[in-house]
Image (cartoon, rainbow, N blue to C red):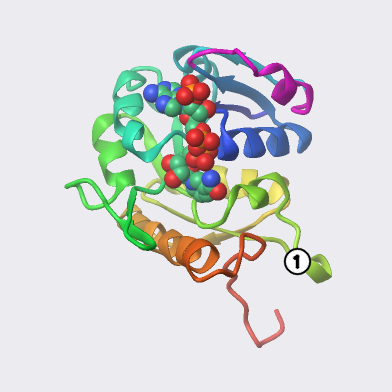
Amino acid sequence: MTKIAIIGAGNVGGSLGARLASSGFAVKYGVRSDKGLDELLSRSKGATSGTPGEAAAWADVVFLAVPAAAAVGVASELAKALDGKVLVDCNNPLTWKEGPVWAPPPEGSLSLALAKAAPGAKVVKAFNTFGAEFHADPSLPHGAAADVFYAGDDADAKKAVAEIAAKAGFRAVDSGPLRNASVLENLAMLWIHLALAAGHGRTFTLVMQSREPK
Ligand SMILES: NC(=O)c1ccc[n+]([C@@H]2O[C@H](COP(=O)([O-])OP(=O)(O)OC[C@H]3O[C@@H](n4cnc5c(N)ncnc54)[C@H](OP(=O)(O)O)[C@@H]3O)[C@@H](O)[C@H]2O)c1
């Protein structure tokens, strides 16, 4: 059974952790404090918790879902534990000016900065382009599922993330190399703008839809 650590048990981490746990994965939340975690653990089948370092050391795949401003620091602290592991970057660096403004670090995207901070980790950008309601439940009308666009440079790591997404009920869409993390971060800016600035609400997701039958 794939062991998945979720660093950060907030809106995204908690929703995704519960979804992955109920999809047959072994989940461990990596948290600074387990105060108030009982309710989340009770709806995350079989999940446990530990410090971020313990969770990262235990896992095969580590999801990072912390405030974007904290992400590089967390990755640096966990660099040793992340060595050789898949690191899934769900985070979006932004400021707010009547809507979201992409604010990447100097490396060009948050994912590239994480790859620098934890050089042994195989970073994959994914699960960042929709609201946490979809991390909890990716289902769409007519049996469709939310698209998880994912980008990375390591083929095995990308395959692992695509398999996790598919098993948890999402549709995984290969979005190219890690340099495209900047594109996915901007896709998130579009989602946030539409949802929160343009008033469409949080109940939609961006999908790749063909008019040709597959
Ligand atoms: N919310 C969304 O719909 C959404 C959608 C897509 C992507 N994202 C991205 O996902 C990330 C998380 O967003 P969120 O809405 O889930 O945030 P959130 O609800 O505020 O949760 C953040 C979590 O990170 C933890 N955390 C903060 N600093 C930490 C540190 N230094 N070390 C370890 N854990 C730390 C917090 O724990 P404490 O209780 O210890 O502070 C909290 O559990 C963000 O980067 C955001 O851009 C959000």
Q: Which residue is at the far front?
A: 98
Query: Is 51 placed above or below 6 here?
Result: above
Which x, y percent locates residue 80? Answer: 34, 17
Residue type at mark 1? Ala
Q: Residue 91: horizontal and vertical position, in percent?
A: 43, 44
**Magenta span of residues:** 32-45
Q: Secondary structure at mark 1?
A: loop
Where residue 47 appears, as percent x and y from the top left, is 70, 21
Q: What residue is drawn where x is 32% and y is 29%?
A: 120
Residue 33 highlighted magenta (yes or no): yes
Q: Quadrant of residue 41?
A: top right
Determine the residue positioned at 67% across, 54% down. Answer: 170
In the picture of the structure, the residue carrying the numbered disc 1 is 144
> Where 72 sits versus 124, above or below?
above
Left or right of 170? Residue 85 is left
- Horizontal relation, residue 91 to residue 46: left or right: left
Quarter of the figure with the N terminus:
top right
